[in-house]
Image (tube, rainbow, N blue to C red):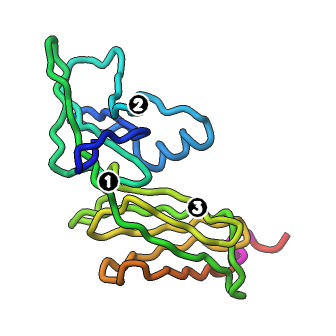
């Protein structure tokens, strides 16, 4: 459910054993986009309910993801046991970041994957808070569901441009479009002339 008490339709639910993690945000995006399959995951229905069959007994961190929301850090782990109770988690509507990706000539670059990774104080990526979008034909992108804090952005373009990493400025005024300029990929000198 969202922080206002309404059910959230289409949230992805992933269970990770408290001892270790089994699926990263990037792997989740790749599985959904390229294989149309999400292992060990469920999606919430019209009432915001999810069901998973054959989950072994144990304690799990519930990783919730949705394009418009981020998970409430106060969500408790799920304890799977005979006669266990129903788990209720909360998603919070997040901020929106809009931007434009251009090449060195200022022309928009379509088809760039923009990955936003939320970092904790030690610099580790926080699972469930990352977002992945792709630029439009006009080079524009919109990322929804961002929480406060530090994010690192990775832009992965077509072969002619080099990938780029940038820190997102959390102090930027809301609604300020972000312009990212890619550089042309330099030839790999380690392969030498043939």
Q: Secondary structure at mark 3?
A: strand
Classify 10 Å Cα crowding around label 1: few (below 14), some (14-19), many (20 and above).
many
Classify 10 Å Cα crowding around label 3: few (below 14), some (14-19), many (20 and above).
some
Per the rendered image, the range of residues in magenta is 186-191
Q: 155 or 95: nearer the eye?
A: 95
Q: Secondary structure at mark 1?
A: strand
Name the quadrant containing residue 122.
bottom left
How far apart marks 3 and 1 lie (CA) works out to 20 Å
Q: 76 or 122: nearer the eye?
A: 76
Q: Is residue 131 above or below residue 12?
A: below
Q: Which x, y percent locates residue 182?
A: 62, 79
Q: Which x, y percent locates residue 179?
A: 54, 82
| Tag of residue 45 | 2
Judge left or right: residue 135 versus residue 7: right
Mark toward the viewer: 3 or 1: 1
| Tag of residue 70 | 1
Circles 2 and 3 in contact, beta carbons < 8 Å? no
How far apart marks 2 and 3 lie (CA) works out to 28 Å
């Amino acid at each position: 459910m969202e922080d206002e008490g309404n059910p959230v339709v289409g949230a992805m639910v992933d269970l990770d054993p408290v001892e270790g993690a089994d699926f990263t945000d990037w792997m989740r995006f790749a599985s959904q986009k390229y294989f149309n399959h999400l292992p060990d995951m469920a999606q919430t229905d019209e009432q915001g309910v999810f069901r998973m069959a054959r989950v072994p007994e144990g304690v799990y961190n519930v990783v919730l993801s949705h394009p418009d929301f981020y998970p409430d850090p106060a969500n408790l782990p799920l304890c799977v046991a005979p006669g266990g109770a129903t788990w209720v988690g909360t998603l919070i509507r997040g901020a929106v970041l809009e931007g434009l990706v251009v090449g060195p000539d200022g022309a928009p670059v379509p088809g760039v994957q923009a990955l936003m990774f939320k970092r904790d104080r030690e610099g580790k990526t926080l699972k469930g808070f990352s977002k992945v979008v792709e630029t439009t034909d006009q080079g524009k992108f919109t990322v929804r569901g961002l929480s406060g804090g530090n994010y690192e952005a990775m832009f992965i373009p077509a072969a002619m441009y080099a990938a780029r990493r940038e820190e997102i400025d959390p102090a930027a005024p809301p609604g300020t479009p972000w312009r990212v300029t890619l550089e042309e990929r330099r030839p790999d000198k380690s392969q030498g002339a043939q």
